[in-house]
Image (cartoon, rainbow, N blue to C red):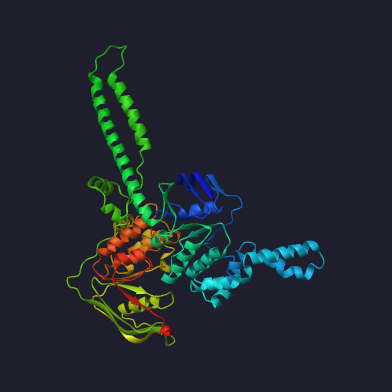
Amino acid sequence: MLLNLDIETKIIGNKPLFHNLAFLVEQGEKVAFIGRNGVGKTTLFNMISDTDNDYEGSVQLQKGTRLVATAQEHHDVGQLSVIAYVLANLPEYQKLSHIIETYPATMGDNTRKIQTYSDALERFSELDYYNVESKIIENLKSYQITEAMAQAPLSRLSGGQKRFVELVRVEQAVADLALIDEPTNHMDYAAKAAFIAWLQAARQTVLVITHDRDVLDCVDKIIEIRDGRAITFKGNYSAYLKQNATATTASMNDYEIGMRTLDNLHKQIMWARSRKPSWHGTADQRNPFVVMENRLQKEHDHIKTSLVKPTFWIDRESAEGLGQKASENYAKYKTKNIRILKTRADAHTHELIRVEDLQLGYDGKPLFDTVNFALQHGQRLQLVGRNGTGKTTLVQALVATSKEVRPETLITGSIICDKKLRLSVYEQEIDPGLTELTLATAIERIYRTLDLNITDEQVMRLMGDYLFDPHQDGGLAIRQLSGGQKARLQMIKMLANNPNLLILDEPTNHLDLPSIEELENALAQYHGALLYVSHDTHFVKHLGGEQLVLKTASAI
């Protein structure tokens, strides 16, 4: 046993987060943590790494365990080069390097220092630190961090690139336990493949927060944080789906029995209460109907107190295989998911956008080879390419042209938009102009910017449809929202003007499994055209469509 966690209570503000949450992790296991947005997965990692110890309970690590965790902030290390930052976090590297670099000039005939120096050389070689810089550079290249970028200050990298550096730091660390939070967000297909290959080969124990189903397919155990507790499922994602469907069906049955029992007890209590006045016994006798009512009421109160509705979620395919009774119960009790408004179908199918012999670039240098494609109602097109090949530039050019603005990156070719085109983009980043607004005000601003009317009541309904609490979340500033909450706000923005062409940029990032599935279901009902970027193979399989592969111009 490497980790034994048993949390009696964890409270944030006035909100109970965990209650009797417990699990074990064995040496060498690859464990994924899943759960709805906001259930406390990142908080749990902070507790394991001892950066949060405000809780009742215990987190026991095997003595001597070396732990490494991906960092979220880099304020104090921004001026370090990327390589220096990774090296500084390698166990023993700094100490051994200092001895090897400084002792030869000072040790002379000091036998103690000579022995320390000799031991350091041996340990440095044992950890393969003589080759570590070249290994780090190669590792960074798999995430498209060039050697020049690796030698530059960490502060020059984008947020996504810093996430990749964190992965390299974890991968290179000689640690017993690695904690990794949402590793594949912002990754292209090659970087994701490199991470999964590392995960499968890693000897250390790895705990990873993720809803990426490709990563979930590669773990030994899945721990779901649900209703303040931890539920452990042995095996990978496929095994989880089967076990979860069975366990959830049983839980629904137990809950249904409990509800029926309460209903029957209530009826009996009402009957006993109605019969009390009709009893005409002697003064020294207790009214049997009073005795019955009190006994039944006590039993009713006990069951009602202990019967708490669990969270019920079963994946789409498993839900379709439920029997009639279980299916009816699931429809009644299932966890609330986002409700995406269905879009209108245009009366006639016609071409919305056409791209002919297009090349885009900067300073006259093309990013990718010439591309040609067209999109009609109902068509799906997956945009494929490594980060930096011009996917975002292409999207920006399509958006600019739809607004009758000539793209600044246009080198050759043309983009032709239908007059009835209503294009909308799902973006990774929130509009900076919205970050200081409250959620309710931001939704209203989104609609007003599109010249769309919206009432306070409609704003409240929208928040509820997208799993926000209108009263608690409506007054939060956008910068205070979690990644999953921001993703749901982007979905509100994307669908506000009833678009007939959607452009989706990694829409499953930050969404939990039920929300991903709900998005897939909604897009399956979508009548317009879709151009999307996604490296979630499950999502791609569900949406389908043709592929448009962008290749860098130099590779042609």
The residue shown at (32%, 11%) is: 284
Q: Residue furthest left?
A: 347
Of 61 and 297, the residue lying toward us: 61
Of 498 and 334, the residue lying toward us: 334
Which image quadrant is residue 259 in?
Answer: top left
The x, y position of residue 36, in whole percent, is: 39, 54
The x, y position of residue 538, in whole percent, is: 34, 63
Say if residue 80 shows up in the picture.
no
Q: Is residue 436 left or right of residue 335?
A: right
Query: Can you say which quadrant of the picture contains the C terminus?
Result: bottom left
Count of numbered labels shown in the rendering: 0
The residue shown at (75%, 68%) is: 103
Above or below for 458 versus 158: above
Above or below for 379 versus 214: below
Above or below for 379 versus 538: below
Which image quadrant is residue 463 in?
Answer: bottom left
The x, y position of residue 320, in whole percent, is: 26, 53
Q: Is residue 498 left or right of residue 86?
A: left
The x, y position of residue 406, in whole percent, is: 34, 83
Of 530 and 381, the residue lying toward us: 381
Q: Residue furthest right?
A: 109
Q: Is residue 491 left or right of residue 362?
A: left
Say if residue 265 shows up in the picture.
yes
